[in-house]
Image (cartoon, grey):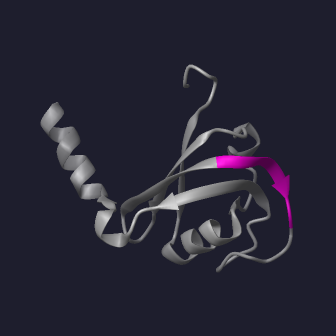
């Protein structure tokens, strides 16, 4: 936890969902999971499942809420938080294999 009480969270979604998250300013899950513990001002790291890359950072702008408006591809994901994302261009994204290699060199 940061000195100001903020926490950092990794949000994981597919490439199409990440685009929707950035455009709509939302992140959603099917089932609350950790979302009720996420607070406004908490930091986010974006991981794109499938592409296996860390793709950007963000901040939580709205606390946990439920909404049944369909906005995400592949599911309703009614448990939501408001977010803003700053996504890196594809050529600047950090591949998970690079992270693993860096970690292994430090051990």
Q: How many marks?
A: 0
Residue drawn at the location 69% of the way across and 75% of the way down:
72
Coordinates of residue 51 in the picture (x, y in percent): 37, 70
Q: Main secondary structure of the magenta part?
A: strand
Residue 53 is inside the magenta segment: no
| Depicted 44 relative to depicted 97: above or below | above
The answer to whether residue 61 is magenta is: yes
Answer with left or right where residue 102 lies relative to residue 48.
Answer: left
Taking 70 as reference, is 75 left or right? left
Where the N terminus falls, by quadrant? top right
Q: Residue at x 72, y 62 (%)?
A: 30
Rendering coords of residue 2 (x, y %): 54, 25
Magenta span of residues: 60-67
Q: Is residue 77 left or right of residue 44?
A: right
The C terminus - image quarter: top left
Would you place residue 6 above or below residue 30 in this image?
Answer: above
Q: Position of residue 77 (x, y in %)?
A: 73, 66
Q: Place residue 16 in its image quadrant.
A: bottom right
Image quadrant in which you'd find residue 13 = bottom right
- Residue at the far top: name it: 3
Depth check: 12 or 62 in front?
Answer: 62
Seen as rendered, the residue at the extreme left is 105
The residue that appears at 63% across and 67% down in the rendered structure is: 21
Q: Is residue 36 left or right of residue 23?
A: right
Residue located 85% across and 58% down the image? 66
Q: Position of residue 69 (x, y in %)?
A: 84, 74
Nearest the viewer among 99 and 24 is 24
Where is 35 relative to 46, above or below? Answer: above
């Amino acid at each position: 936890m940061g000195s100001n009480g903020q926490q950092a969270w990794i949000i994981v979604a597919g490439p199409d969902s990440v685009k929707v998250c950035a455009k709509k300013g939302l992140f959603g899950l099917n089932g609350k999971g950790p979302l009720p513990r996420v607070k406004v001002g908490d930091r986010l790291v974006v991981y794109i499942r499938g592409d296996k890359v860390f793709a950007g950072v963000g901040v939580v702008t709205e606390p946990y809420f439920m909404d049944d408006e369909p906005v995400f591809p592949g599911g309703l994901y009614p448990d939501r938080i408001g977010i803003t994302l700053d996504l890196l261009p594809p050529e600047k994204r950090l591949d998970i294999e690079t992270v693993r290699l860096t970690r292994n060199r430090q051990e």
